[in-house]
Image (cartoon, rainbow, N blue to C red):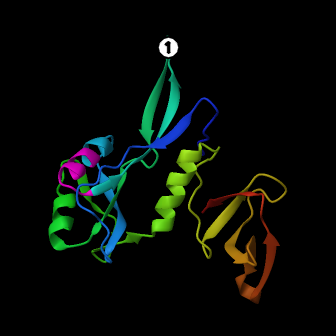
């Protein structure tokens, strides 16, 4: 499902209030999981503790039978971003804020998010450019093409010289074909 921002819709970010500087060499951005519709509460509590946080939000017009209303929604439901040095004390504080579940982690260790990715989100929302959500696809993942002449074809997503290709393999004879799929809609299988 893709969501597009239309001219009457805007996107922006909840302002950041920073009490404890997060400028240390070990200071990184992390994704903190929250309960549904608790993102703002978590951001407020984190800021009370002096932990820098970021909640990207969009403004959409919702329509009911009798009225229209502009509502603000988190861009990424159930996630807020936190910039901090990952000490045991700060990790414990942030993870135990009311409404928070814990950090997105691998093997028990929170995964840092590169500054460029957060900057990219901020820039996109600040500029109010048209955008849409896309399914996250990795090179090497099995995918299916939706629409067009290749509708329903499945294969492995590849990248070569900046172009996306779909590799269709016949295991029994150990042969493969690759077709360029830039411009096609692709979904994970």
Can I make out residue 104 in this image? yes
Outermost residue toward the top in this view:
66
**Quadrant in which residue 26 is drawn:** bottom left
Magenta part of the chain: 43-51
Q: Is residue 31 left or right of residue 8?
A: left
Q: Is residue 15 left or right of residue 4?
A: left
Outermost residue toward the bottom in this view:
174
The residue where tag 1 is placed is 67
Position above or below: 65 against 40: above
| Residue 52 percent location from the top left of the image | 29, 57
Circle 1: element type: loop
Q: Magenta stretch containing residue 44, yes or no?
A: yes
Q: Residue at x 24, y 53 (%)?
A: 100
Can I make out residue 1 in this image? no
Q: Nearer the viewer, residue 64 or 54?
A: 54
Q: Magenta stretch containing residue 24, yes or no?
A: no
């Amino acid at each position: 499902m893709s969501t597009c921002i239309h001219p009457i819709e805007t996107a922006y970010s909840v302002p950041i209030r920073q009490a404890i500087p997060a400028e240390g060499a070990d200071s990184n951005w992390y994704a903190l999981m929250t309960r549904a519709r608790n993102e703002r509460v978590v951001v407020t509590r984190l800021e009370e503790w002096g932990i820098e946080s970021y909640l990207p939000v969009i403004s959409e017009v919702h329509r009911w039978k009798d009225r229209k209303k502009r509502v603000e929604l988190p861009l990424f439901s159930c996630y807020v971003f936190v910039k901090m040095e990952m000490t045991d004390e700060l990790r414990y504080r942030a993870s135990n804020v009311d409404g928070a579940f814990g950090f997105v982690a691998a093997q028990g260790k929170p995964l840092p998010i590169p500054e460029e990715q957060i900057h990219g989100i901020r820039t996109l929302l600040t500029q109010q450019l048209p955008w849409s959500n896309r399914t996250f696809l990795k090179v090497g993942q099995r995918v299916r093409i939706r629409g067009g002449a290749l509708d329903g074809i499945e294969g492995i997503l590849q990248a070569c010289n900046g172009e996306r290709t779909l590799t269709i393999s016949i295991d029994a004879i150990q042969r493969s074909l690759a077709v360029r799929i830039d411009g096609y809609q692709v979904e994970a299988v």
